[in-house]
Amino acid sequence: MSDTVLVLNSGSSSIKFGLFELSGRDPVLLCKGLLDEHETTPRLIVKNPAGEDLFEKQRTGSDTDSDHLFAYVLAFIEEHFGERHLRAAGHRIVHGGPDYSGPAELTEDVCAKLEALTPLAPLHQPRCLAPVHTIRAIRPELRQIACFDTAFHHGLAPPASRFAIPRRYEERGLRRYGFHGLSFEYVAGRLAEIAPELAAGRTIIAHLGNGASLCALSNSRSVDTTMGFTPLDGLVMGTRCGTIDPGVLLYLQQHEKMSAEAVQHLLYRECGLLGVSGLSADMRTLLASGEAAAREAIDLFTFRAAQDVAMMATTLQGIDCLVFTGGIGEHSKEIRSEIGERLAWLGVRIDAAANDAAHDRINGRDSAVDVFVIATDEELMIARHCAAVLQAMGGSSD
Ligand SMILES: Nc1ncnc2c1ncn2[C@@H]1O[C@H](COP(=O)(O)OP(=O)(O)O)[C@@H](O)[C@H]1O
Ligand SMILES: CC(=O)OP(=O)(O)O
Ligand SMILES: [Mg+2]
């Protein structure tokens, strides 16, 4: 009887899951799915590893929240993969605070500690922790493991980790943590497989999805990143503002008389591509639109991404390799090309045909920088961490 692990990845715009078999050297995907939270027709979609539909469940009138869809995920696994032994549920937890440099078992105490970090990731933390409670209620004996977005950046040190505020606040945890670590860790691993000669070099990974951030890697380790204390910092995102003059927040509170809650809602949910375009947070919609405001939102997105690549390159004292990943980074040749053009002064040259094909290497022969497109796989990274945790705990099947 082979062992399996269920992986849940709750992002800001999607909830994905995967069931992995743990018998071999690397976890193998058995099925994957999506909890589509569309307002009127929320759905659970399950696919086989080839991407073909296996099952679909629409939430009905009596089903009031995502809990029901998680319960269906567990029931589906029991029905179709019940002969295997589900050993653990692994969760992407966006904020791990200062304490976690690796995965942790989700005991009640650990959950309470992570819940206390909600103000530092209000869009994500409750969504990440909700399935932990649901699964505990249905399968209290099932081991649950947290894999943190922040853990990959745990080695971040001053000055990269520091804000220019009085030291007493830093002692209370006000520092830069960084996020998207599971994605950066996976992509760094893939890059080392595709181009091992670059693993020791200076690499910048651009995770461009609904949330977006850059990571500067030296010797495959994170030395700087654009997200900070919260996943609000850095690049322009779907609905988040990214880096902003803190004076704007004071102005909104003092002169527009906005409450702290209203400012939080504005900065997390109404800014970014949505706020500037007035149209959509979805890059596909903006690229297809002929409206001037949509173009302006795209220009701001690529302008700020290129500016911050230069900032990361300063940390690294140069750049050998640039990697695009995330929904936009993997799928939009226009955005890759526009960011590449803004970085021409750094010697970046993207080859048009290779960029169209979007397969691994996309730089031209005359490029001073190696440029790649690598599809991220946060679920597989979580499954790998869980496999290591379970192995360290020993072969027992509890
Ligand atoms: N073909 C495409 N062209 C441009 N953008 C795309 C394409 N496919 C997906 N995207 C964009 O990717 C973003 C979502 O990224 P993703 O990484 O899946 O999100 P999440 O952060 O929720 O994991 C959306 O803005 C979406 O428009
Ligand atoms: C940390 C973060 O922004 O995650 P996501 O891209 O899933 O919103
Ligand atoms: Mg994501």
Image (cartoon, helix red, strand yellow):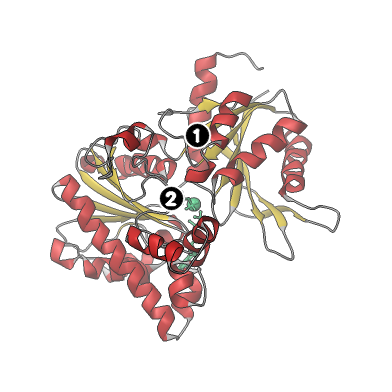
Check disc 1 and report the residue beneath it.
147
* Residue 290, above or below 195: below
Q: Please identify, in this view, whether the residue under mark 2 or under mark 1 is nearer the observer.
A: 2
Q: Measuring from the top left, give residue 245's x and y in whole percent.
A: 32, 61
Beta carbon at label 2 within 8 Å of ligand 2: yes
> Does residue 244 appear anywhere in the picture?
no
Quadrant the C terminus occupies: top right
User: Tag 2: residue type?
Assistant: Pro
Q: Is residue 318 left or right of residue 294?
A: left
Tag on residue 278?
Answer: none
- What is the distance, in whole Å, between disc 2 and disc 1 at their CAs? 16 Å
Q: Residue at x 81, y 52 (%)?
A: 63
Q: Residue at x 30, y 64 (%)?
A: 304
Q: Callout 1, which amino acid?
A: Cys
Spot occupied by residue 112 in the image (x, y as percentages of width and height): 59, 30
Question: x%, y% of residue 338?
Answer: 30, 71
At label 1, counting other C-alpha atoms closer than 10 Å, the crowd grade (few under 14, some 14-19, many 20 or more) is many
- Say few, some or many: other residues with alpha carbon within 10 Å of mark 2 (under 14 / 14 to 19 / 20 or more): many
Q: Which mark is residue 231?
A: 2
In this view, 263 is above or below 9: below
Quadrant of the rendered structure where residue 294 is?
A: bottom left
Assign the N terminus to one quadrant of the image: top right
Q: Nearer the viewer, residue 66 or 218?
A: 66
Label 2 secondary element: loop
